[in-house]
Image (cartoon, grey):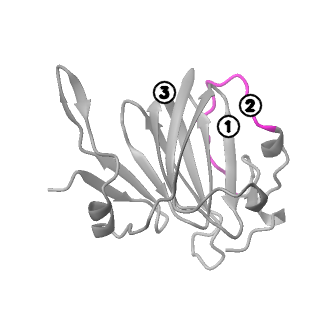
Amino acid sequence: MGKFKFNETSIEGVYVIENTVFGDERGYFMETYQKKEFAEAGLDFDFVQDNQSRSKKGVLRGLHFQHTHPQGKLVRVIKGEVFDVAVDLRSDSPTYGKWEGVILSEENKKQFYIPEGFAHGFVVLSDIAEFTYKCTDFYDADDEGGIMWNDPEIGIDWPIDDIDEIILSAKDEKWLPLKDSDVNF
């Protein structure tokens, strides 16, 4: 029996991954990645970079992508809770412009795999969240692009009713809607 359950979503290539957690009175242990099991599930790639961020409630990071060095990402939360989103930017995809979202938290220990050719972002729902992710390509600041987090044509249903203020970076405030963005996957 594998240590992971790979749940397909409504968008091809995007997965919600549930880990087997071994726990007792001391705490817990789980594998978060195992190349052989991921490859057997059709997720056969090499990770080249790991990242971690810490953000407070209401911080929304995204929606980001890289133009010529797209990154596949395996994301998870190690403290707190976020709503994580992937938007399909693959021009030949039947789900182009569609989104998939999932709650990731330290309690549910779920992971989200977002393939290359997607925009990615998340909003922090807890007081603090620590977010970690593996990438299939290196980050390149000169290659970065983005789309507006609240693009009405994409229509992401962000669960932000309990958030007093959405906090964006100056860069994220300037992204355009998808229809006006320079995206070519």
- Nearer-the-camera pick, 7 or 141: 141
Q: Quadrant of the C terminus?
A: bottom right
Instruction: State the predominant SS element of the stretch in magenta.
Output: loop
Q: Is 104 left, or right, of 89 in this rendering?
A: left
Query: What kind of residue is marked 2?
Result: Ile
Q: Earlier in the sequence, mark 3 or mark 2?
A: 3
Is residue 155 toward the left or the right of residue 11 in the image?
right
Seen in the image, is 30 located left or right of residue 76?
A: left
The location of residue 74, given as percent across then percent down, is 47, 53
Name the residue rendered at 35%, 57% in the picture: 7
Q: Which residues are magenta?
A: 154-169
* Disc 1 + disc 2, Cβ < 8 Å: yes
Q: Is residue 92 magenta?
A: no
Residue receiving disc 3: 80
| Residue 167 - label | 2
Marks 3 and 1 sit apart, C-alpha to C-alpha, by 14 Å
At x 38% / y 69%, what residue is drawn? 44
